[in-house]
Amino acid sequence: MSTDTSSNPQTPTATTPGGNCGPKIPVQGNGGDKRPPDTAVQMSGPKRSRTTWIVLVIALAAVVWSLNGTGVSIANIIAGWDGAREIASGLFPPELDQELLQSVGKAVLETLQISIAALFFGTAGGLVLAVLMAGNVGAPRWLAAGARLIATIFRSVPELLWALVFVAVVGLGPAAGVYAISLHAAGLLAKLVSEQLEAVDPAPVEAMRMTGASKLTTGMLSIVPQARNNIASLVLYQWECNIRSSAIIGFVGAGGIGQALGISMRLFRYQELATLMIALFLLVLAVDQVSRFLRRSMGAATR
């Protein structure tokens, strides 16, 4: 006897096949969910708003706590205004003695040499560490952990402290500055470049691995080429940082224009100090223009 199902209307139940011989598994449809589809979105809105306000309050409290702890206030600036005005008045006019200008020119060239030599060593070391650290390259875990530890040590110690160490090891002069800046630059580039390597498109990487390419070949031919423009920009920016760092480490005898700046400040030769500051500014400006030109030649949207 046949049964008429049309006289017993029911909400149809979706099923999924359990195979050719298996039973059909019912799937609950939207009819069993009494909550509107957008309720979850409506519920997440207030929660996200509360979280944002909590983060802002914590950040504001941290700023206030830091300002109070460091004693930063407008009153301090006003109290020291007389001393600042005395120093500023002593800077003008800058010293333009011929012998001083020749000395400043030599210091500028030495600073440029320090920055380029440190960039060479720092980039070489940083790229090696970055390739070992990048997760998509697939270096052995113990090797990646070791590279990450070395990079952390290199960048956690400021260039000034590295300069003190190398001044004690190799003596006063630009060589100590090169070694100090190189180590810090290697640690910093290792972190930044490894993040660029990990952010590349994984599709070409997987395609090359499916062809049987080794990890080294995949990294050099598929991962690094995708990130080469960003890596080049990081290296050029590190060059600018090396210029500024060489001016700082010179105060501890690591050569460059920073050493001349330290001597002028200790002897209260403010007009000579002004000349050195102008020379440093022009050097940084020139390096910035060269860096912008090189980035533009690589296709960066810079002006």
Image (spheres, rainbow, N blue to C red):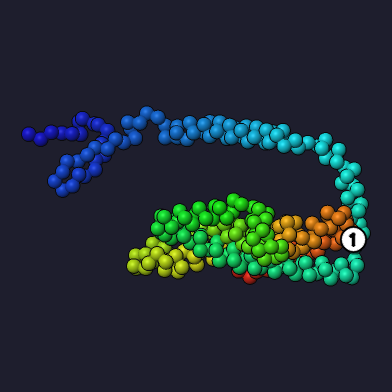
Q: How many marks?
A: 1
Q: In which quarter of the image is residue 215?
A: bottom left
Q: Can residue 86 be seen in this view?
A: yes
Give whichever of 242, 211 is nearer the camera: 242
Q: Residue 303: x, y in percent?
A: 70, 63
Q: How crowded is mark 1: few (under 14 residues within 10 Å), some or many (20 or more)?
A: some
The residue tagged with tag 1: helix, strand or loop?
loop
Q: Residue at x 38, y 62 (%)?
A: 206
Q: Residue at x 29, y 35 (%)?
A: 28
Q: Give the residue at the far left of this rendering.
A: 1
Taking the image as shown, residue 215 lies to the left or right of residue 259, namely: left
In the displayed structure, would residue 60 be above or below residue 296? above
> Which residue is the site of mark 1?
94
Taking the image as shown, residue 190 lies to the left or right of residue 180, namely: left
Give whichever of 237, 181 is nearer the camera: 181
Q: In which quarter of the image is residue 35?
A: top left
Q: Residue 4: x, y in percent?
A: 15, 33
Q: Residue at x 32, y 31 (%)?
A: 32
Q: Residue at x 41, y 68 (%)?
A: 217
Q: Give the residue at the far top of this rendering.
A: 34
Q: Residue 164: x, y in percent?
A: 67, 55
